[in-house]
Structure formats: structure tokens, C-alpha cells
Amino acid sequence: MKQFKIVILLFTLYTASVKSQHLEDYKLWLKYGRIESKTVLQSYADLVSQVYFPADNEVLENAKNELSTALPNMLGKPVAFSKNLAESTLIIDRYDQLPNALQKLIKEDVDNLNDEGYVIKTVAYNDKNISLVSAKTNIGILYGTFRLLNLMQMNEDLAGVSLADSPKIDLRMLNHWDNLDRSIERGYAGFSLWNWQKLPEYIDQRYIDYARANASVGINATVLTNVNANALVLTPMYLEKVEALAKVFRGYGIKVYLTARFSAPIEIGNLKTADPLNEEVQKWWSNKAKEIYARIPDFGGFLVKANSEGQPGPQKYGRNHVDGANMMATALKPFGGNVIWRAFVYSEHDDTDRAKQAYDEFLPYDGKFKDNVVVQVKNGAIDFQPREPFHPLFGALKETPIAMEFQITQEYLGFSTHLVFLPKLFIEVLEADTYQKGPGSTVAKVVDGSLYNNAISAMAGVSNIGNDLNWTGHPFAQANWYGFGRLAWNPYLSADEIAEEWLRTTYSNDKNFIEPIKEMMLTSREAVVNYMNPLGLHHIFDTGHHYGPGPWVDNLSRPDWNPIYYHKADENGIGFDRTDTGSNATEQYAPFLEKKFNDPATTPEMFLLWFHHLPWDYKLKSGNSLWDGIALKYQKGVDQVSTMIATWENAKPFLTVHEYEEVKMLLQIQLKEAKWWRNACLLYFQTFSKRPLPKGVEQPNKSLEEYRSLKFPFAPGIRPQWN
Ligand code: GCW
């Protein structure tokens, strides 16, 4: 009996610990675990022996709360807050509040900050060393506090710290594709966080934790609703709920934006038209703006998808994107709001190469938008593929602020089951040179506004967040949220730095864990390109849901939704000719790049089949034929996933059972799906190439017919009407 009780007790303890391990995922990179190193612990204990942190408003209170929860967790004892600045060892206060003597010590650093920046510095003051976190604004203090805690989580030496940092991009925003029924278009981490039914009264703790996580990486704007918009969100019933969310987010420096359905004046305003040049329509939007700002004085503005994939827009009335955007901009202007107008347009009535259409349509509008309009452009000209060359509008639009739109949710990268570290993809695009103002005209400089001195700069990320316990479905997908935020703050960071920060704050500071796992993260993006879309292949995903391979799909209503449109495989070869002998999409790039991309010999092989249709026996740089090269890349992708699994298995001693098992199971699915991609694509392309698989490439274990017959009517993330 006694033994039985012990077993029960052990079992209860075990399940309790497994349960709480599970909850650890919820904390994201804000775990604030106990610091293990005795020396680090001692130095931090000295540093925070007395903390001076006056907080007389909500933002500062939030910062102070974060510190009050984090420090005891990390140090194992409560924080001693003091009202006496002179006796304190850590001083956190706005610059304008500091005594002159302290101001002098950081004046130069502070002068160089912008309004959201901060200084963290250890200085000699009153015969002792004290650490100072200061900023020009409350938000700067909040960001500085989060940064201090981040450094502590990474066990950084603070004795000699001297850090001054400001965001390089103004609008650092998440775009939620969340519907009012809480489904999420292209969402793979559960349902929407926004519980519209319980709002405005019920404030879920998740709203606060979401805001904390965003503020910790500097995200300062959120678009709550899907770009495929529902006008109802602009009605009083919903605006009251939006107001409640905005109130929570305000305390963390986050502004709320909404998607505005262009036909809203008809749908919820009883007007007969949504023509942007119609006075009543204009008045309707102005009144709507007034109504929103009465509730939410710091409302950010509207994000609009118009005349794209069936969404309403100004073209229905013979007007253009400028007319539409400027009409909304006029309505928002008196209140300081922005219009973010998307350039994701392509038409089924236009047989021009889809990759060319947005540039053709938007370039003539350069300089014609009002000054509170930002044009938001996806990173590539097609659609968030595992790899695309940068969108030619970057650098070409010279007098229009242009926002970068990245996709954090993995619509085309294995949903939330595949481990893919996206900052590698983001940085590849940001580092690309547009040559539009000579060499060095990188996309990052376009986006941060420095190349053309734009008045507003912006970066948006389509969110991968849902109500899954761990927020993002895959624990490593948290790193993509984190990494997006860090790059929106500073688009010049390296993937290595970001991965390292995230690993240290999420898992462990042990070098023996970090080095191999960081390597695994850094290769993961190339792996997915290899096993899905090697050598410039793109958009060969299965219909609608985009889950798994579908290179054979040829029956969709629009030609440019069919994979065969993109790979153009035939007996002679494979690839999309976008050179001057083909669609001539290359002419949309600066002359230096145009020339480079027009010749397969000078086109980087990662973009080869994006720009060229080449024979199966075309010789690659490796000496292999194109066919062999494609097959070997698919195999390599699969091998890379096997290596990722081995790496993870080796890391077991550093992980809890839960942490280890959850990623291991996911990696095994990833391996299975990587093989599925390899087999299905190679069997299909082989029907054209009529060549054997080269040595080293595994033979598929199913027939092409079996792969073609797979159907996934309930794959997540799809719009019901697209099924
Ligand atoms: O390619 C498409 C996605 C759609 C998305 C669209 C867009 C929100 O498959 O789900 O719609 O891009 O970015 O507007």
C-alpha cells in the first residue's frame, strides 16, 4: 500500500512537472529563468541591490512590472525599489528627469537617440558604479527595460555596458489575417487571439502577454484583421471591442490598425457606391475616421487590399489605386492616421507574367500618393515563396514610402510543422542590392527610408500567432516572430545574432547547446528551399491550401494559380523564361541586374529557373546536368532534415523531456514531408525529363499516381470559399 502511494505521488509530481513544462512554452523568450552561474548572479545582485524607477504613467508602470516579475525569477530574491536616487545602483528614468550630473554623463548618447531609443550604460557616479537605463520618452524606457532584461537573460556582463540603440524603422507592424469568426487565413497555430464575443468587457491575459512579447522586440503596431476584410469591424459594435484592445496595447507602445474594406460605405453605410471621387463616399470615410478617433485617439490607420484577388476597390468605378488611397488618406489626415495600401495585385484578365503586374501598375503612381500613404509590397513579386528574388518595386519607387511585407506564418514553408528559421530569408532580401542609386542601394536602405529620405518607413510581418498554448504551433516558429521584430527594429542585424539571442533567452546559455542548434536553425531555410523549390522553382504547391507538392495542378480557374504556369516543364526543359526573349520581367530591375539576370551563366543558380527555361541537360556550375542537379538538391534537402534530427537528438541532455519530444516529433513529420516533396516532384518532372535519377538520390517508394491522388480537404488556414 505504501509503495502504491509512493508510485501515485511520483506520478502526480511527474505529470505536474510535465504540465508545467508545457506552460514554459507560453512564456516565449521572456522566461526569466534562474541564473545558474554564481559569478553572474553575484554581479547582477550587486547591480540591482537598490533600484530607482519612478513610474507615474501606464507605460512606465508596465516596464516596472516587467522588472519586478523578472528580477526575482532570475535572481531568486525580491527587488529592492528605492525612492532615493543617490543611493541606488540601478537607475531607470527618463532623461529629462535625471539630475544634471547624471544627464551630463550620457548626454551625447541621448542626443543621438530617436524618440523610441534608449541608453543602457554603467557609469561612475557618487563614487560608485551605477547602471543607468534612460531615454527621451516613456516608450524608450520600456524598450530599454526589456533590453536590460534580455541582456541579463543572456548573462551578459553589465559592468562595462554602454549601449545606445534606436529603431531604424518607424512602423514595425504585425499583420494578422484574423477573421471575425476567429479563423485565421493561413494560420497554423489555432484560432485568433481576439475573442470578439467576450470583448470589450473581458480582457484575456493573452492580450497583455502578446503586447509584452511585441514590446520586448520593439513591435509598435498591429493590424488586427484580415486584409480580405469584413466591413463589420468598422461598425460601432466592433469598434467598441477594438477600443478595448487598443487600451491594453497602448501601455506597451503598440498602435492598433484595422483593415478597411473598400466597399464598406455600401455594406455598412447604406450608400449606393464606394466611388472614391463621390463626395458622399468621401464624407462617409471622414466621418468614420472621426468616429474611430473619438474612441481611439492614437488609432494607427487602415491597411487596404483593393482590386486584388476579388477584393473590392476603386477600379470598379474607373478610378485607380491613387484615387482610392488618397481618399482614405484625406479622411485620416486630420487625426494623424496612415493608409497602408497593398501592391499585391495581379489580374486574371491580364496575361502579362504575374511577376510583372504589380510593378507595371504601381510604378506610374510614384510620387502621386498623399504623404500619409505607404505602399506595402511583398518581399518577392509572386507570393511568399521559399525563395524569390526581391520585388523590383524596391528601389524603383523613389518618391513613395514603401513598406516591406514579409510573411511570418509559413503558408509556403511547411505550415507550423516545419522548422524553418525565417530571418535567413528576410535578411537575404534585405541585403539584396537593387542598384537603383548605384551599388550599395540595398533593400534594407530602401525600407528604412535612408536611400530616398522617405518621411515614413515601415516593415510588416504576416503573423504566425494563434491561440495554441505555445502561440506559434512550432516552438521554433517563436523565433520567427522574435526575428521579425528584431529586424524591423534593425534591418542590418545578422541571422546568427538573432538565432543566438533567441536560443539563449528561450532554451539555454550553454555553448554546447547553442552552437549546434544555431547551426541547425541557420541551415533550415536552405533545407526547405532544397526539398520544396530548388534552383529557382516556385509556386508548385498543391491547390488552395498550399499543403504539400502539386506541380501537376493545371485545372484552376486562373492560369496564374496553376503550378504548371510557373515551372513550364516540358520535354525540352524546365523554368520560366523571364528574360528579354521571354516575359522580360528582368527589365524591371536596374540595368546591372537586368543584364545579369538575362544570362543564365551570370544568374545566381538559386534563381536559375525563376528567370530561365533551360534544357534538361543544361550544365550547372557543379558540372552536373540540370536534371541531375534538381534531383540532387531535392535529396540534399531531405538529408539536411535528417541532420537536423541528429543534431536535436544530441541536444537531449540540455532539454526537458517535453522540450525534446515536441520538437523531435515535429522534425520527424518534417522529414516525412520532405521525402514526400522530393518523391512527388521528381516523379512528376521525370515524366518530361525522361532521365533516370542520379546516383545518391533515393528511389521513391510510391507511384506518381499515388502522390497525385492525395487530397486534404481540411488542411488548416484556408478560406472556406477557396475549398
Ligand atoms: O497568395 C495569397 C494567399 C492569400 C492571401 C493573399 C494576400 C490574404 O494565399 O491567402 O490573402 O496572398 O496576400 O492578400
Image (cartoon, rainbow, N blue to C red):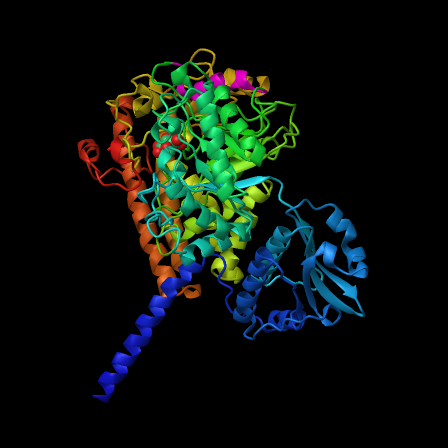
View quadrant of ligand 1 = top left
> Residue 590 falls in which quadrant of the image?
top right
Position in image of residue 326 (x %, y %): 52, 24
- Residue 124 lies left or right of residue 572; in this view the side is right
Q: Which residue is at the far top?
A: 581
The quadrant of the image that shows the C terminus is top left
Task: Check the image and report above or below for 702 versus 241.
Answer: above
Position in image of residue 205 (x %, y %): 42, 58
Nearer-the-camera pick, 239 or 44: 239
Q: Residue at (79%, 66%) from the top-left corner? A: 125
Nearer-the-camera pick, 342 or 321: 321
Nearer-the-camera pick, 676 or 59: 59
Q: Residue at (57%, 22%) from the top-left corner? A: 396
Task: Check the image and report above or below for 642 versus 87.
Answer: above
Magenta residues span: 352-367
Q: Can residue 522 be seen in the rendering of this structure?
A: yes
